[in-house]
Structure formats: C-alpha cells, structure tokens
Image (cartoon, rainbow, N blue to C red):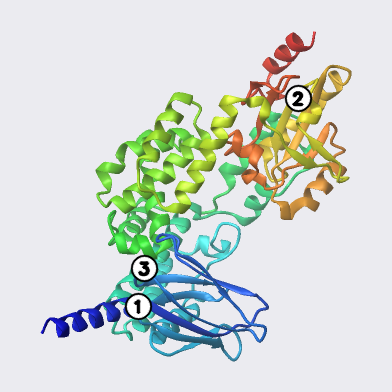
Amino acid sequence: MKKSNLILAFLLFANIAFAQKITLSGTIRSNDTTLTLSHQINGLSIKIPVRKDKSFSTTLTIPGKGIYNLSPIADLYLVPGSNIRITPADTSGYKFSGPGSLENTIISSLSEERKILPIGGDIGIRFSALNDKPSYFLDLLSTFQQNVAAKVSKSTDTFFVKIMNGLIRNSAQSLLSTYRKYYGFDSLVMQKMTKPRKVGYYKSVADQMKLLQYQAATIRANFLTPADIATIDAAYEKDFSWNDEQLFKDASPYRNQLIDKLSEIPKNKYGQKLEPDAEAIEVLKIVDEKIQRDLIKNFVKGNFGLIYLKSGKDKHRVDSIYQMLSKLQLLPFVKAQIDVQYSNYAKLKLDPSALDFSYKTIDDQVVTLKGLRGKYVYIDLWATWCMPCKAEIPALQQLEKEYHDKNIHFVSISLDNPGDKQKWINYVKENQLTGIQIMADKDFSSEFIQAFQVVSIPRFILIAPDGKIISANADRPSNPALKIQLNKLLN
C-alpha cells in the first residue's frame, strides 16, 4: 500500500514537472543564429540555437502561462504543455501548428485588424487622423476592439481571452490619449518646430523663444470642445484598474498607461508639467494610496525612483531614495538600471576627477577628458534636433572667440542618436562650429552622460584643470553670469 502511494506520488510529481515544460520547433526566414525567448516581468531570457538549415527545436521550462516574446519571430502565448511548431507563412509572417497553436494564430492574425488604425509617424499617430471628429475616432477604436474580440473569442482559454481583450483595450486607450494630446495639430507647423535649423537662423535666445511661442500658438488648427474632452476621458478611463496584476505581467500597454496616469496626477495638481525629479517625488508620495499589489507597486516605485536618481539635485534625497529602493523586491531589469545609475552617482560624489570620456571628432580624432587636463573645460551637451541647444550656439561661439587665448577648452558633445552621426557631421561643417566638437558613443545612455544624470538638454558642465567639477549644471553661454564666473577663474 505504501509502495503504491509512493509510486502515485512520484507519477503526480512527474506530471506536474512535465506540465511546466513547453516545446518550440520550426524554421525561420532570417539568417539569425539564435532566437531569444523572453518575458520582461518574470525575467525569463533563454537563447535558442538555430541550425545551419534555419531549423530549431527546444524543450524548456517556463514560470507560467502568459505572453512571451520569441525574438525575432513574434509574441507567443505559451502555457505549460504547449508543443508549437513555427514555420514561415506563404507571403510574410509565420504560421503555427500543434498544441497551443490556435491562440498564436489568433495573435498573428490581429495585424489585419490593426490596419484600420492610423498608427505611425513621429508621434505614434498619423497627422491626418488628428483632425478627425472625436465621434468618428471613437467609433474607429470601438470597431477595432469588437473585431479583435470576435477573433479572440474563438479560443476556449478564458485566461487568454481576458488578457488579449485587456491588452487591446489598453492599446486603443493609449492611441486615444495620443489623439487627445495632439488633436488639431497642423503638420506643417509641427515640421517647422522640429526641423533642424542652421545656427544663423537664431539671432538670440529671445528671438528663438518668440518663434517657439508663435508656433505653439498656431500649431492647432482645431480644438476639442469640453464635451468632446469629457467623452474622450471617459473612454480612456473605462475598465481601468490600478491593480490588475495579470495585465501588468503580460501587457506592456497596461504598464505604459499606468505610468502615464500616475504622471498626470501631479500635472493636474499643479496645473503644469513638473520637472522630472519633482514629478517623481510627487508620484512616490501617492503610490501606496493608489496601488495595493506589491508587484505593481514596486515596479512603479522602481520606475519613478530611477527617474529621480537620474535627475534629482538633492544629494541627500538621492541617497534616501536609493536606500528605499534597495529594500524593495524589484524586477531584475529595473534593479540593474537603478544599481548602475546609483553607482555612477556614487563615483561622481566620491571622486569626480576619475570621470572620463573617449569620444571622436568629425575627423575621427579621439578626445578624452583626461587629455584636456591642465585647462578649465566648459562642456556643452546638445543635439542637432534640440532647438534651445542651437539657440545657445551663437553665444557659445562668441565666448570661444573672447577666450581663445585663455586657459580653457570649449567642448561640445553631441547627444544625437549614433545612427544620425552624418547629420551631426553635416551640421558642424555647414555651420562652421568652433571649439572641440565630439559625439557621445551612446547618446543619453553614454557612461559619462549617465554619471551626470542628464535627462534633458541643453546642459552645461564646468570642470577645473585638475579634473574636479566646479559645476555639474553650469550657467548657459547666454547668461551674463557665466562670463563673470569665467573672468574670475581665468584672470
């Protein structure tokens, strides 16, 4: 009797263990040598080798059912026991067969439903849709959700149906939020505001600000009525929960909406968008009131805590927030970012002179910060897409002329995307920019930039000849106070 019970227990354990496993196999279109199965929230990240004939097969254990990403193929819905074969479809995309394939076929087919949505462009929505009547736009989103729900309902997996309907609802609400924010925008005025200008276009910072104010006042061709706003806001709030843990795990649109809604609270409280560090503090004050689920609560605290670590000016508060975050059970990818950010901050606080960079000029000459020792260094952090940055260039060039024989280097570090290197080179050449012109290796993610917790530009840094930091947030070239400070240091 005891022996039979032992065998039964063993078989039960074996079935449970097996039930957590999934099998993936098939062939791919691309020449990738590995696939990556990942889940951002549960931390899973597994490399799957691809054979020379582009085939692959693997059996592995997953933490539980949910939506995973198999890069570079597709998002997959996986449940313990899935045995899915993936092969290229006739024209594009992939087709699925085997246990667990129905739900993935449904997910793949939703690309057809998305075609009715005006998704695209620099702001995530086509400008042509920004002047559609609210009633038309809301009907469009409703039709999209109904079409998706009809497809999703073909599955008998209630967990899948709930997750997909929630994910699609959050996606539609996110698009609706963008529509509300940019409604009535004139694409031609928008283009003028974002298109890079030559230095000579701006005579002064004041002129540039006048231009921006004029463009901001004329950018909307149409405006929403109070009734329209109320209707849109009601649709945006519909069925939203601060504590939907399953949607949080499997739907990035839900997580994005959660963060956006929290950011709106201090904005509505103070009547304006706050600076990142101030906004982070305000949100951290209300998280416990809004959210009860620890997984979501810790994610939010980690997200806004990281924002403060990147932008906070109060050193004592930076330390206290890091201590608070270190006691939380954070998601691995969030904790890694927080640790890196605080490590950079600690280095800056402990030994600022240890900081260095190694960036290249337009002629591929390497420039290092330590190589500039012996002189003061005034650093300008800018980008070709940043209008306030470019408005400071005439004043910066004037300073360079006045102090060209003094004990100071003027260094301009571009934070343009590395893919826009040629745009930066062309801008420097066309405008005959003087001083030391270099480009950061990873824009805002560059180690030197991260060390100074830079989240917005223009930003200016003043460093002493021995490498010590005089000011991590120095006055702008257009501010007369900078010239007074330089005269005291250099004379």
Q: Horizontally, is 319 left or right of 362 in the view?
A: left
Figure quadrant of the C terminus: top right
Nearest to N terminus: mark 1 or mark 3 = 3
Residues under labels 3 and 2: Cα distance?
Answer: 52 Å
Q: Horizontally, is 99 left or right of 314 in the view?
A: left
* Residue farthest along the left direction in this orientation: 1
| Residue placed most toward the observer, 217 or 88 | 88
| Residue depth check, mark 3 versus mark 2: number of the one nearer the observer | 3
Q: Are marks 2 and 1 in contact (CB under 8 Å)?
A: no
Residue located beneath label 3 in the image:
63
Q: Callout 1: 10 Å neighbours few (<14), some, many (20+)? A: many
Q: Secondary structure at mark 2?
A: strand
x and y percentages locating residue 376 in the rendered image: 76, 20
Residue located beneath label 1 in the image:
80
| Residue placed most toward the observer, 51 or 408 | 51
| Residue placed most toward the observer, 192 or 414 | 414
